[in-house]
């Protein structure tokens, strides 16, 4: 019995020595700044920086291959901490968040056929360019919601994607997955947006959507510097957007939304402050 115990103990001791020597021989030296950077990052592994995860981004930062400002979900505080660790000046770009430029849910926008396929916008888009008559409207099948690592997107009961202005970090993953390019990055400070993505003429838009832009130019007349009409679609010139709110009540189709007054109807964001277009324009 004693011999067996001594034998097993000896084998264990020898194995431990071998493993210890192997660990020392094959150890990979890690830049201590890389570990500090990894601790400073939010740990979301969202890929917004262009790297597979936070560890890859931390390594790239330590090796001088990445810009501290590329971590948009981390915000100014994270960028400042990264810059402090690297000993460089912190430069934070203007915060941007994603907005769905559409309010055409099933109650307001017409379908051209009934889609019964898998719940995926890209799959639906491949079938006769999507079930909605509007060529640029939100399909509402939740592809953007599924890729959002921050729970910032929900699909309303009427089939419209809505992005929380409080939860969005500007990682752009939803923008990349949307097959209709209806999600756009906008300045976080801008609260007034034209929520339409159709470039069809007004008479055509009226046939398939009750809340689309008809390029009537009324917004441009109300706030000339804040709106631009291009290819039959109005958009806010965010560089001159301070006066954009002046046109919200004048828009005849209510396609201009001021998020300070509430989110699109049906969503749960904003603490129950979601408003119907008629309420927005009241």
Image: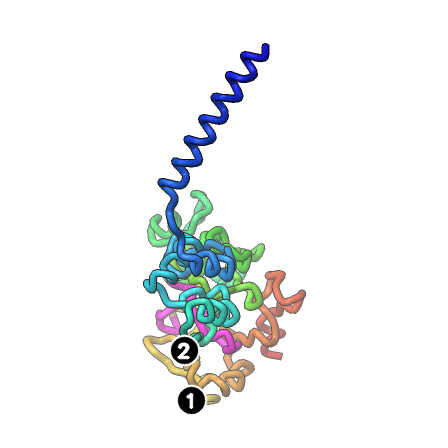
* Residue 101 circle label: none
The residue positioned 50% from the left and 74% from the top of the image is 188
Q: Which residue was labeled with disc 1? A: 225
How many residues crowd mark 1 within 10 Å: few (<14), some (14–19), many (20+)? some
Q: Nearer the viewer, residue 167 or 58?
A: 58
Residue 178, percent across and down? 40, 57
Q: Secondary structure at mark 2?
A: strand
Above or below, 163 relative to 243: above
Q: Is residue 137 magenta?
A: no
- Is residue 255 visible in the rendered image? The answer is yes
Report the span colored magenta: 178-203
Rendered image quadrant of residue 269: bottom right
Question: In the depicted view, which residue is nearer to us: 250 or 3?
Answer: 3
How many marks on residues?
2
Q: Position of residue 270 (x, y in %)?
A: 63, 67
Looking at the picture, does residue 256 appear above or below residue 25? Answer: below
Asked whether residue 98 is in view, the answer is no
Instruction: Please name the residue shown 44% across and 75% down the image.
Output: 90
Q: Which residue is pictured at 41% across the width and 39% down the height?
A: 23
- Residue 228 location in percent, x, y? 38, 82
- Position of 246 compared to 123: left or right? right
Do the residues bearing badges 1 and 2 touch, measured as CB atoms within 8 Å?
no
Q: Is residue 240 shown above or below 56? A: below
In space, the residues marked 1 and 2 are separated at their CA atoms by 12 Å
Nearest the viewer among 22 and 53 is 22
Q: How was this image coloured?
A: rainbow
Task: Kindly report the secondary structure that dominates the magenta region of the rendered protein.
Answer: loop
Mark 2 surroundings within 10 Å by alpha-carbon count, few (fewer than 14), some (14 through 19), many (20 or more): many
**Which sits earlier in the primary sequence, circle 1 or circle 2?**
1
Q: Position of residue 94 (x, y in %)?
A: 45, 76
Which circle marks residue 234 in the picture? 2
Q: Is label 1 in a helix, a strand or a loop? A: loop
């Amino acid at each position: 019995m004693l011999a067996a115990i001594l034998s097993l103990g000896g084998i264990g001791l020898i194995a431990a020595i071998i493993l210890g020597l192997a660990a020392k021989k094959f150890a990979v030296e890690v830049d201590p700044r890389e570990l500090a950077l990894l601790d400073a990052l939010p740990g979301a592994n969202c890929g917004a920086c262009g790297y597979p995860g936070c560890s890859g981004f931390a390594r790239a930062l330590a090796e001088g291959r990445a810009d501290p400002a590329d971590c948009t979900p981390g915000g100014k505080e994270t960028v400042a901490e990264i810059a402090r660790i690297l000993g460089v000046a912190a430069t934070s770009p203007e915060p941007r968040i994603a907005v769905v430029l559409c309010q055409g849910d099933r109650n307001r926008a017409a379908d051209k056929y009934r889609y019964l396929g898998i719940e995926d916008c890209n799959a639906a888009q491949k079938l006769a360019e999507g079930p909605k008559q509007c060529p640029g409207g939100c399909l509402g099948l939740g592809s953007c919601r599924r890729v959002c690592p921050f729970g910032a997107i929900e699909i309303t009961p009427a089939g419209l994607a809505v992005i929380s202005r409080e939860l969005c970090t500007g990682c752009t993953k939803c923008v990349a997955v949307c097959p209709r390019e209806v999600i756009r990055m906008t300045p976080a400070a801008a609260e007034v947006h034209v929520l339409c993505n159709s470039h069809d003429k007004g008479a055509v838009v009226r046939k398939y959507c009750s809340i689309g832009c008809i390029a009537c130019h009324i917004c441009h007349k109300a706030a000339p510097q804040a709106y631009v009409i291009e290819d039959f679609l109005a958009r806010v010139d965010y560089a001159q957007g301070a006066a954009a709110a002046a046109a919200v009540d004048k828009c005849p189709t209510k396609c201009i939304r001021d998020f300070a007054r509430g989110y699109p109807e049906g969503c749960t964001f904003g603490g129950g402050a979601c408003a119907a277009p008629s309420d927005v324009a009241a």
